[in-house]
Image (spheres, rainbow, N blue to C red):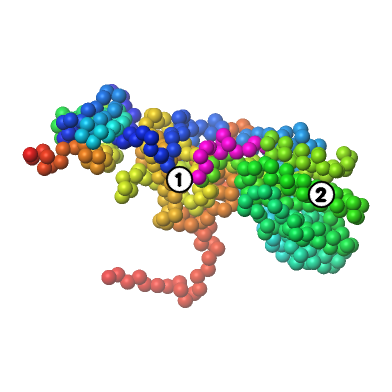
């Protein structure tokens, strides 16, 4: 999973997609995950990074992470498989 | 190393200039304590969900209401509306504060008697009073508010049989300028039914007409409607005095004052917009004082206010069962609080506050209950902080009607805890059990054995 290259994210959690002109806001943990995705970290690496820093358990984070990724996909913020291959 | 507090990751699209049915974020502080008791501990000790009632708030509210009226009108009496919340402990608080009992069924009448209320201080309203109920009420010299002519004739017959002269009032319905007009209780003012009923009573030796009553509506947001009602009842009372030289002892304006809840569809929160006791008191007192009653013969003003006196004292505590997404991507949160115990969620957008710390991030959320029924929706839309599974929430202003209109449906009804003036919790109604439910059922002998076959 990889964040689209042209997506801009500010430190305060404001995300801008120049292709669609849409803006989004994120909470701090959302920014953290986004930055890990930008660095092309795997799901496993992201899970491990978050679980080591935050007071939560694997099933809770796994559920929330999949939900978060789903919303990123829904808003076309991640590279699709085809795009990645191309 | 201490780990950071977890909050689930969220990303929200920013839309400017678009109407948002979820409204703006309303919660800024968690509600961690109720009258000095930690919400967390209350739920650990008494379970989730849990009704919590603040005795301090009840007393403070009734005292505020009494002050609003007594500073404006010399003779005021409150009567506690049993149907609003008839848990024995709650009724007892109102009776300690000097309220009479206002009941609308034989069951409620017996409840008031069993609590030790003097029969003379029970107002018996409602369209259904059996002969047995009326016989009791006549024997106890209670105030019987007549709803229809059949009841009037029944009382007359019973009075003759009992050789008693019951004290009665008639229930009057009228146009007070509000929609919908409530015309199902009692006799109509405008078409002369009320005057007709008054004449029938006045020509009977079997009853003493002591009062006039009305119940003009519920959750009234226009105090002016009470001014019109008070003026019309005053005119009727003065007509009785003129024709029969008979003094009407009291005018009872019933209930219906709005609480601080927010009605569905309202743009602004009820806590900011709904009338206060002072607003109602000003209009009602002015209408009565400006009528033609002689100062020494002002009738007593009776108020059967229920909702506005108890709503704010009640909280419903619950837990998050799960967060989900709908097919359209909307956030859905499931609580362990269903409409079976929060009936008023059909009428109000109840204020919901998390009971633990949260950040300033919020999410548009639909709040569902745990029942396997599509109608089990607590809030269709609320902008709430990010809630995790097992987080706790406090639902506000639930003191009225929920503990009387609740249903044993799918789940059992929870404990009700009263926090007293010294901030000590007491269970005032026990959580239901399977044994409670089964104890009321009987299974015929031929149905006691069965064999469930395995496929």
- Marking on residue B235: 2
Point out the image quarter for the N terminus of chain B: top left
Q: From the image, tell me which residue sits under label 1.
A: B379
Q: Secondary structure at mark 1?
A: strand
Residue B41 visible here: no
Q: Is residue B21 left or right of residue B71?
A: left
- Marking on residue A34: none
Q: Secondary structure at mark 2?
A: helix
The single residue placed furthest to the bottom in the displayed view is B446
Residue B214 is situated, as x and y percent measured from the top left of the image, at: 73, 52
Q: Is residue B16 left or right of residue B299?
A: left
Q: Residues within 10 Å of mark 1 (few under 14, many from 20)?
A: many
* Chain of residue at mark 1: B
Is residue A27 rendered magenta in the image? Answer: no
Quarter of the view holding residue B144: bottom right
Q: Is residue B70 left or right of residue A7?
A: right
* Closer to us: A64 or B145: B145
The single residue placed furthest to the left in the displayed view is A86
Residue A69 is situated, as x and y percent measured from the top left of the image, at: 23, 39
Residue A17 visible here: yes
The mark that comes first in sequence, 2 or 1, is 2
* Chain of residue at mark 2: B
Q: Residue at x 51, y 39 (%)?
A: B267
Spatial CA distance of label 2 from label 1 is: 45 Å
Point out the image quarter for the C terminus of chain B: bottom left
Part of the protein shown in magenta: B265-277
């Amino acid at each position: 999973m990889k964040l689209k290259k042209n997506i801009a994210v500010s430190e305060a959690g404001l995300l801008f997609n120049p292709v669609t002109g849409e803006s989004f806001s994120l909470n701090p943990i959302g920014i953290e995950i986004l930055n890990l995705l930008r660095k092309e970290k795997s799901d496993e690496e992201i899970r491990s990074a978050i679980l080591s820093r935050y007071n939560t358990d694997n099933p809770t984070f796994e559920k929330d992470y999949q939900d978060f990724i789903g919303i990123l996909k829904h808003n076309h913020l991640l590279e699709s498989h085809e795009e990645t291959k191309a | 190393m201490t780990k950071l507090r977890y909050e689930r990751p969220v990303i929200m699209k920013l839309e400017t200039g678009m109407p948002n049915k979820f409204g703006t974020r309303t919660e800024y502080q968690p509600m961690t304590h109720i009258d000095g008791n930690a919400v967390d501990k209350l739920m650990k000790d008494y379970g989730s969900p849990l009704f919590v009632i603040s005795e301090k708030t009840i007393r403070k509210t009734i005292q505020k209401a009494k002050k609003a009226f007594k500073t404006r009108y010399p003779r005021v009496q409150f009567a506690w509306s049993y149907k609003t919340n008839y848990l024995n402990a709650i009724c007892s608080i109102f009776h300690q504060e000097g309220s009479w009992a206002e009941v609308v069924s034989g069951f409620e009448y017996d409840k008031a008697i069993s609590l030790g209320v003097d029969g003379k201080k029970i107002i018996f309203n409602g369209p259904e009073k059996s002969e047995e109920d009326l016989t009791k009420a006549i024997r106890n010299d209670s105030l019987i508010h007549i709803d229809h002519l059949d009841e009037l004739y029944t009382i007359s017959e019973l009075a003759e049989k009992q050789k008693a002269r019951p004290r009665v009032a008639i229930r009057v319905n009228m146009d007070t300028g509000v929609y919908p007009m409530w015309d199902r209780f009692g006799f109509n003012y405008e078409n002369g039914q009320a005057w007709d009923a008054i004449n029938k009573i006045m020509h009977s030796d079997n009853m003493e007409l002591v009062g006039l009553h009305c119940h003009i509506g519920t959750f009234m947001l226009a105090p002016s409607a009470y001014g019109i009602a008070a003026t019309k009842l005053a005119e009727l009372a003065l007509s009785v005095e003129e024709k029969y030289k008979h003094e009407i002892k009291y005018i009872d304006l019933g209930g219906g004052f709005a609480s601080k809840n927010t009605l569905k569809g309202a743009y602004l929160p009820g806590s900011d917009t709904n009338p206060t006791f002072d607003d109602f008191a000003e209009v009602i007192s002015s209408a009565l004082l400006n009528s033609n009653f002689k100062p020494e013969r002002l009738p007593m003003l009776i108020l059967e206010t229920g909702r506005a006196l108890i709503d704010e004292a009640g909280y419903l505590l619950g837990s998050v069962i799960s967060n989900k997404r709908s097919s359209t991507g909307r956030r859905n949160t499931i609580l362990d609080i269903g409409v079976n115990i929060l009936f008023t969620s059909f009428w109000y957008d109840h204020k919901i506050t998390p009971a633990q710390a949260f950040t300033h991030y919020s999410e548009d959320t639909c709040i569902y209950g745990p029942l396997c029924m599509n109608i089990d929706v607590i809030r269709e839309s609320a902008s709430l902080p990010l809630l995790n599974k097992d987080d706790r929430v406090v639902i506000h202003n639930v003191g009225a009607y929920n503990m009387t209109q609740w249903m044993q449906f799918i789940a059992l009804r929870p404990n009700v805890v009263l926090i007293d003036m010294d901030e000590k919790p007491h269970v005032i109604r026990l959580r239901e059990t399977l044994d409670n439910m089964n104890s009321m059922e009987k299974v015929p002998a031929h149905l006691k054995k069965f064999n469930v076959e395995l496929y």
